[in-house]
Amino acid sequence: MKHILTFLFLVILITPAYNQSDSIKNKLKAAAIISLNSDGIAPVPSFSLDKPAIIANLALTKGRFSYEPGLAYSFELKPWYIDNWINYRIVNRDKFTFTVGFNASSFFSSDSSKRNKEILKVQRYFTFAFTAWFRLSENSGLTASYWSDNGQDGGDKGHFATLIAERTHMLTGKKTFFNASLQVFYINYEGNSDGLFVTPRVSFNIVNFPLSVFILGTQAVQSNIEPFPEFKWNAGIAYTM
């Protein structure tokens, strides 16, 4: 709970100040998205909380650098994960960007096996990432990413590669529009945790209105995970600052 309050206070404090004119070069900019999810799905979409979740993401950008922390909690306000992404844009052009990033993250799980008491376990990960973004048109783009996940203290190590095709601002009326994306990703983690997955996502938006409604699903195409991963879906409401 303390982490949520601190994060929200930071968002409220800095967002109005830094969403003003960008006329000053390299001025610090901020954005935030807070979402309520029916079935929380992790940044690697094959992993989920399997219960409703609150997810908050903040982005602070100055020049080529960005800091993008994220917090996820269950509706019972039990922590799920904490992200701390630091990114640097090596190539920063209108139609192409290439970014390197590092993330120090923590994943939380419950252990009720000892004396009928629930103990919160933490697994730490250090992730190195490379991301390329291609702008195909005014409202469409491709994103390709590779992550090297390095679990600490016995955590799993592995690889995550993804390709996302996105189309935005598809008008359905004068005041409403859809955004849609299709993500294909491959995971290769220790302990027979390999697989190819596909994740479509659609959001419904109102022009100049901060709330949007979204739905997404994740389906395994091929995997050696036992049992074979079942279809997962998630719907929710997002508030963008």
Image (tube, rainbow, N blue to C red):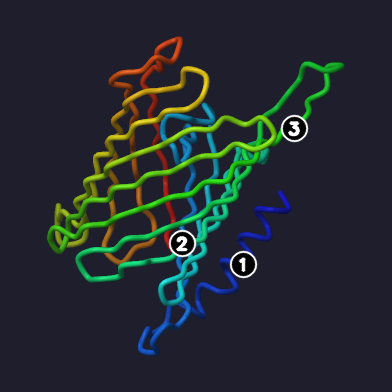
Q: Which mark is residue 149?
A: none
In the displayed structure, does residue 231 sit left or right of residue 47?
left
Q: Residue at coordinates 19% horizontally, 57% vertically from top-left?
A: 169
- Disc 3 vs disc 2: Cβ atoms closer than 8 Å? no
Residue 190's spot in the image, x, y percent?
51, 24
Furthest toward the bottom, the residue is 24
Screen quadrant of the C terminus: bottom left
Residue 240's spot in the image, x, y percent?
42, 60
Residue 95's spot in the image, x, y percent?
19, 66
Q: Which residue is mark 1?
A: 10
Residue 114: image quadrant is top right
Q: Residue at coordinates 57% horizontally, 55% vertically from top-left?
A: 84
Type of amino acid under label 3: Leu
In the displayed structure, does residue 164 sit left or right of residue 37?
left
Type of amino acid under label 1: Leu
Q: Which mark's residue is nearer the viewer, 3 or 2?
A: 2
Above or below, 237 against 186 in this view is below
Q: Earlier in the sequence, mark 2 or mark 1?
A: 1
- Disc 3 vs disc 1: Cβ atoms closer than 8 Å? no
In the displayed structure, does residue 107 sit left or right of residue 35?
right
Q: Which residue is mark 2?
A: 87
Q: Which mark is residue 120?
A: 3
Q: Secondary structure at mark 2?
A: strand
In the displayed structure, does residue 184 sit left or right of residue 191?
left
